[in-house]
Image (spheres, rainbow, N blue to C red):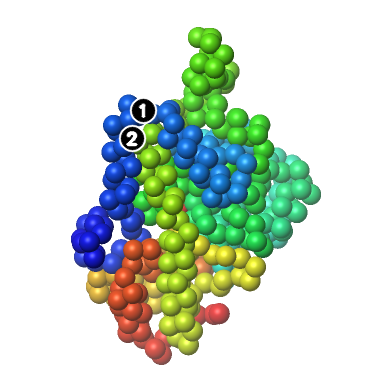
Amino acid sequence: MNTGGKTVYVNSDRIPYARQTVDDGDVEAVCGALRSGWLTTGPRVTAFEEAFSAAVGCAHAVAVSSGTAALHCAVHACGVGPGDEVIVPAITFVATANSVLYCGGKPVFADVDPDTLLLNPEDVRRRITKRTRAILAVDYAGQPCDYDALGAVAAEHDLSLIADACHSLGASYKGRSVGTLADITVFSFHPVKHITTGEGGMVTSSDADMAQRVRRFRNHGIARDHHERRRSGDWSYQMVELGFNYRLSDLNCALGISQLKKLPEWVSRRRAIADRYLNAFQDCRSVVPLHVCRDVVHSFHLFVVKVADEASRARAFAHFRQSGIDVNVHYLPVYLHPFYRRYQKTEPGLCPISEAVYNQILSLPMFPGMANGDVERVIRVAGDLDPRAPEPSR
Ligand SMILES: *Cc1c(COP(=O)(O)O)cnc(C)c1O
């Protein structure tokens, strides 16, 4: 697709719920990495980590091969092991809970607030046991959780607070930027997220030891990487724990550096689209956007609306899809997936609010490259939904 001389690489005429923006500058950046001779563990990795730390305002950033790898590193860095419990929201992508299982721990599901789908700090408190080790919060849709409340619960019970910020790059809470709000924070650069590296992720922390544990874990558990060995003029290395190859290549980091420059502009664009939706749906009976809290800057990875019930959701979903608009549903409560029902013997009823809200939600298209005409088309199609439908609770 050619938009006014600037080539934008896309592959669909339908309106997806999310889509990356890749331009010629990004292509040049990756080609530059290919020509540089450094394909991995080179200068672009460090440069991406430094640019990311600066953008987020955090002390340490460690690039890894995916958001899932970042979660695994973070949960491990908090010392979670066999027998430990980690509290996670019921409504999230499966990777959030899976990362606890990777470490031998047990994800304990807590319920969410029905208006924001953010982890409810009071429900977290109720699910704490003597085996609880950490709280793993998710900034659902791009809105930061109530970190003051979660931080207080964590401090009271001596727990680590981990932020899954895969939805919330560029967001802030009470003037503090996401990436600095928890003991350790995790980001994803999958193409549907705020910026992309193809696949990729980042872990941020203000704690140098925590960052060092992540660096070691992403490199097989080897205590010194090749940079440190070169500096010390020594060939030896020691593997001191079982780690993984979770490194992110210089090709991916070149793309990340180029994409990161556009983050402020893209977050503004997402927020402008959200404003248009919020305005259009203000007096709409059939769809109700999720609540946006005061004191936060929401970075709108997703724009989620609620409809009255499961039957209305099925009708709305079909109507959007038939109109060329690829709405989606984020997410089935994790413990209702067949694996969790088998593995943890979880049953419906565990998190009643999550289960009820899951049946009402729909994610509308939201991405920075979305044209104003496409936003209006989504609003028009939403307007076709039965205006006499029972009103979902606000
Ligand atoms: C995308 C996402 C992940 C996983 O990120 P990947 O980069 O795809 O591995 C984890 N948690 C949440 C909430 C996500 O949205």
**Residue picked out by circle 2:** 33
Label 1 environment density (alpha carbons within 10 Å; few <14, some 14–19, many ≥20): some
Locate residue 15 relative to residue 130 in the image: left or right.
Answer: left
Percent coordinates x, y for residue 332 in the rendering: 45, 58
Badges 2 and 1: C-beta atoms under 8 Å apart?
yes
Residue 390: horizontal and vertical position, in percent? 46, 85
Q: Amino acid at mark 1?
A: Trp
Name the foreground residue: 194 vs 388: 194
Left or right of 38, for residue 355:
right
Earlier residue among tags 2 and 1: 2
Q: Which amino acid, mark 2?
A: Ala
74 relative position to 21: left or right: right
Numbered mark located on residue 38 in the image:
1
**Residue behind label 2 places its C-beta within 8 angstroms of ligand 1:** no
Rendered image quadrant of residue 245: top left
- CA distance separating discs 2 and 1: 7 Å
Residue positioned 38% across, 34% down in the render: 250
